[in-house]
Amino acid sequence: MNLRHAVALTVLAAMLCAVPLLSWSQQSSEKAVTDQLAASIYNGPSMATLGELADGIGGRLTGSPAYVRSAEWAVAKFRSYGIQNVRLEPFIIPAGWQRGTATGALLTPLSRPLNLASLGWAPSTPAGGVQGTVVLISDVEPDALRSREEGIRGKIVFLDTAKIYADGYGKAIPKMEAAWRLFQKAGVLAVITPDREKSNVLNAHDGLWGAKLLSIPAAEVGMEDSKLIQRELERGTVTLQMTIENKTSGEMKVNNVIAEIRGSERPDDWILIGAHLDSWDFGTGAQDNGAGAVSVLEVGRALMALGKAPRRSIRLALWGGEEQGLLGSYAYTQTHLRELNDCIAVLNTDNGAGHPKGWKVEGREDLKKALQPLSDGVW
Ligand SMILES: [Zn+2]
């Protein structure tokens, strides 16, 4: 039932934003409408729809064939609800990437397999893989890195990300972009980064944001295996081997999915209800963010089933490229720059299908106030 709670919260918040001028309490007819919408959602197909996306299509990395299928599926879903204005809105990512295989092993001082996976947007190793001694890099300040340049030639760099990202990911990213360039220039064979999940579990992620191809092969290594490597590095020399095969391509077009229900009284005012459609590829993307994507679809279905247009226009958006750094939603703001002053509110859902407790409001205090009634003891 939690997904239905989440969907209901989304649609009720949308209705609140779509009602101009009068206060919530004055709108008794709106109460009847929201009751009708809530009933439609509770009796609706949200779990079956999520099954089609998560089980039927599965993980849908931005730009992958599965992502393309999911976008086409979403278009067909919106149209099946009777929404006329449904379209794919393209944006360009710098590189396409699809995961292949990745294997690795410690060679000395111990011989044992490593639990690893390629970082997203990492290139393949040369055929037969790479083999080399491991050097630890904990400081990516430009001067510190330059002093290591000679020492890392022909080596495998272990990036101590706990230290590098200690002051926040955002601060470290520009330094990391320079570091990747230097690694390539210095002739580093490959990079490994430790994962942070216990039991050697790997969480899919990339080395840099932006769907940009990394300069050299790179893998994430399970936490316990990483700690073993770090302990052995304190004792002496560590060598390892890894082989990665991925598919990469140059620039490619990726589509956001946009559906619009035109408003009856103020059609030029619009409320955007969005969620990212893309996911990482280890799982089926049910929680992150199939649940959010289905919430957006359900808003469309329930509003169309009502048979009554909202007063303001409602745009339903399913983004691509979120996991690579909010690429699809950012592209939308650039394409629709001239219309942004007419945007009344944006509701974006990316929290899975747990019990909803309210909305995070960023940037606008007045929106926080407007959404407060939905957070006060409704559930
Ligand atoms: Zn997400």
Image (spheres, rainbow, N blue to C red):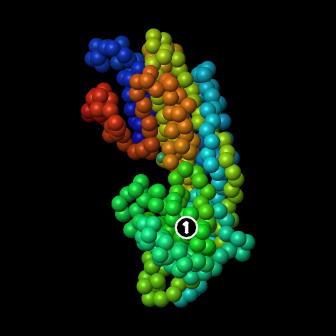
Q: Residue at x 46, y 26 (%)?
A: 340
- Seen from the viewer's position, the closer of residues 41 and 163 is 163
Other-residue count near label 1 (Cα within 10 Å), few / some / many at <14 / 14–19 / ≥20:
some
What secondary structure is found at the residue carrying circle 1?
A: helix
Residue under label 1: 182
320 or 310, nearer to the observer: 320
Quadrant placement of the N terminus: top left
Q: Residue at x 66, y 72 (%)?
A: 243
Tell me if residue 261 comes above or below residue 63 in the rendering: above
Give the x, y percent position of residue 32.
37, 16
Horizontal side of residue 125 vs 353, given as left or right: right
List x then y, in percent, for residue 308: 49, 14
Q: Quadrant of the C terminus?
A: top left
Q: Residue drawn at (45%, 66%), measured in percent from left and top?
A: 142
Q: Is residue 83 visible?
A: yes
Residue 165 position (above or below residue 260): below
Residue extending furthest top? 265
State whether residue 123 is above or below residue 295: below
The quarter holding residue 140 reads bottom left
Image coordinates of residue 191 in percent, x first then y, are 56, 70
Q: At x 41% / y 37%, what residue is drawn? A: 6
Q: Is residue 156 depicted above or below 12 in this figure?
A: below
Query: Residue 201 in the image: x percent, y percent?
Result: 49, 66
- Camera sees residue 8: no
Q: Quadrant of residue 131?
A: bottom right
Q: Amino acid at mark 1?
A: Leu
* Residue nearest the observer in this picture, 63 or 33: 63
